[in-house]
């Protein structure tokens, strides 16, 4: 690690910009699923940036598509002109959306995507009342922050909306956790009804939900929960927005979009992160009637630029051509099984959850449900020393987040599993000292 760069980072950048590790690393190159830091250390990246590098590093098909655009001399002009790749990507995402008459708007981030979806829903429904799930994260704009049910990330308390939060995804710490799947869903549906009846006028614009909560520690609700919610929402004309920023593009293995596990097609889906395999791109796909409800002009200067959309189109085709969703299902299943077996012996692990290559390992004080945040930090450090980068999250910062690039190989999955078993075992032993 470069001491000088860290000192300069601290002096030049905000104090609230979180950095991982006691000795933060500077990644200078990457290939496949591996990255190399400035000191020449190589790591297996089991967080894919933060799910940004959905496919992997240095993929020629994607780099070439970006290079071809750069070689034209035009990085971007303006979205006021026609951009061929933007149209092609919108058509492709529309086809994949499962919606009847889809339209796509491109942004530069997940935050802007959610701001846009919230803008559409509140405008369409002419209501500023919004529902969100507890333990959610939707970004750092005023709208997106307003629907973020995680105080550790709610940097500002100001919201343009009247927001009510419902139970749902974080089953491990839910009062309904011991119920069967069907009863858990029924209890959450009752809670939703009660929240609508007691905290809103009934005239609510939308409910926004992540099918698996990302920042919230890969909190995974039972399949069908959001579908059951949708039935209640429909009674009130409330729109469902699925935030697919982490769960999109086949990451959950069994489906292309996370919401598909719930048997419902939402009014809008938002996306970002993995789509560009590292490029800054996000967007919203929605039924045309909703998308076209804005009457004033609205534009994103860089949203849909030719470099981002050209690169994303190449990434999307790569992902589909190589059945990376299938790979996520297969290797994710193997990892989940291995971690669950290990959890039976390792009392530091309270919960192993997730789908595909989106796996959360919640650490607790052995024999309790008390969050063990320090142990999560310790496991991260130990894993890093053994050449494995993993993420962290959850309301209490005690959940390890595993989300490698979806080109992961079997050997790499085994290697990571081995390191995770060793490091959680060591962290647990250290607690007893
Ligand atoms: N939604 C979800 C589910 C996210 O995980 C994130 C980012 N962690 C965002 C929205 C915000 O995306 P961005 O940081 O690109 O603005």
Image (tube, rainbow, N blue to C red):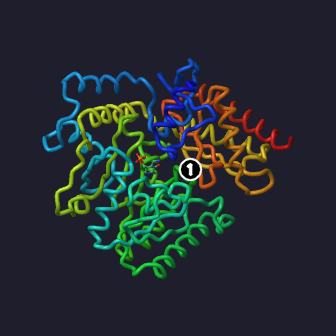
Q: Quadrant of residue 315?
A: top left
Q: Residue furthest right?
A: 433
Q: Which residue is painted at 58% across and 38% down in the image?
A: 20
**Dot 1, crowdedness within 10 Å: few (<14), some or many (≥20)?**
many
Q: Residue furthest top?
A: 40
Q: In the rendered view, tell whether residue 360 sits above or below residue 291.
A: above
Asked whether mark 1 lies closer than 8 Å to ligand 1, one says no
Q: Quadrant of residue 302?
A: top left
Q: Residue furthest front?
A: 11
Q: In the rendered view, tell whether residue 13 sits above or below residue 288.
A: above
Q: Can you give x and y, in whole percent of width and height, for residue 213 in the image?
A: 52, 53
Q: Which residue is painted at 50% across and 26% down in the image?
A: 27
Viewport quadrant of the N terminus: top right
Q: Which residue is painted at 46% across and 46% down in the image?
A: 246
Residue denoted by label 1: 218
- The local secondary structure at tag 1 comes to loop
Which of 377 and 182 lies nearest the eye of the viewer? 377
Q: Which residue is painted at 59% across and 41% down in the image?
A: 333
Viewport quadrant of the C terminus: top right
Which of 211 and 72 lies nearest the eye of the viewer? 72
Q: Can you give x and y, in whole percent of width and height, for residue 217 in the image?
A: 58, 50
Which of 272 and 13 lies nearest the eye of the viewer? 13
On screen, residue 372 versus residue 397, left or right, reads: right
Q: In the rendered view, tell whether residue 164 sits above or below residue 113.
A: below
Q: Can you give x and y, in whole percent of width and height, for residue 316 in the image?
A: 35, 36
């Amino acid at each position: 690690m470069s001491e000088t760069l860290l000192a300069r980072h601290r002096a030049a950048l905000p104090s609230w910009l979180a950095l991982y590790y006691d000795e933060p690393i500077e990644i200078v190159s990457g290939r496949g699923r591996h990255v190399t830091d400035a000191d020449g250390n190589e790591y297996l990246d089991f967080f894919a940036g933060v799910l940004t590098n959905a496919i992997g590093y240095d993929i020629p098909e994607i780099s070439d598509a970006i290079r071809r655009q750069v070689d034209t001399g035009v990085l971007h002009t303006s979205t006021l002109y026609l951009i061929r790749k933007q149209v092609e990507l919108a058509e492709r995402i529309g086809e994949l959306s499962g919606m009847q008459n889809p339209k796509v708007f491109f942004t530069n981030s997940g935050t802007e995507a959610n701001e846009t979806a919230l803008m559409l829903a509140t405008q369409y429904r002419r209501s500023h009342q919004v529902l969100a799930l507890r333990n959610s994260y939707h970004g750092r704009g005023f709208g997106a922050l307003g629907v973020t049910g995680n105080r550790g990330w709610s940097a500002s308390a100001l919201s343009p909306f009247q927001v009510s939060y419902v139970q749902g995804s974080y089953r491990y710490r839910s009062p309904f956790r011991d119920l069967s799947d069907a009863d858990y869903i029924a209890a959450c549906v009752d809670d939703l009804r009660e929240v609508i009846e007691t905290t809103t006028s009934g005239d609510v614009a939308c409910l926004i939900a992540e099918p698996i909560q990302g920042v919230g520690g890969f909190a995974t609700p039972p399949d069908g929960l959001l579908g059951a919610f949708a039935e209640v929402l429909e009674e009130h004309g409330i729109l469902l927005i699925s935030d697919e920023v982490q769960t999109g593009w086949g990451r959950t293995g069994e489906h292309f979009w996370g919401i598909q596990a719930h048997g419902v097609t939402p009014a809008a889906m938002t996306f970002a992160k993995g789509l560009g395999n590292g490029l800054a791109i996000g967007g919203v796909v929605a039924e045309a009637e909703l998308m076209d409800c804005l009457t004033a002009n609205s534009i994103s200067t860089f949203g849909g630029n030719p470099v981002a959309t050209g690169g994303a189109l190449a990434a999307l085709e790569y992902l589909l051509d190589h059945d990376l969703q299938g790979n996520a299902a297969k290797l994710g299943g193997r990892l989940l099984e291995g971690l669950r077996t290990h959890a039976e012996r390792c009392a530091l692990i309270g919960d192993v959850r997730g789908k595909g290559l989106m796996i959360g390992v919640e650490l607790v004080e052995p024999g309790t449900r008390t969050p063990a945040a320090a142990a999560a930090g310790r496991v991260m450090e130990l894993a890093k020393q053994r050449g494995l980068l993993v993420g962290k999250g959850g309301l209490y910062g005690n959940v390890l987040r595993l989300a490698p690039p979806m080109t992961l190989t079997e050997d790499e999955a085994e290697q990571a599993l081995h390191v995770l078993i060793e490091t959680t075992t060591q962290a647990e032993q250290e607690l007893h000292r």
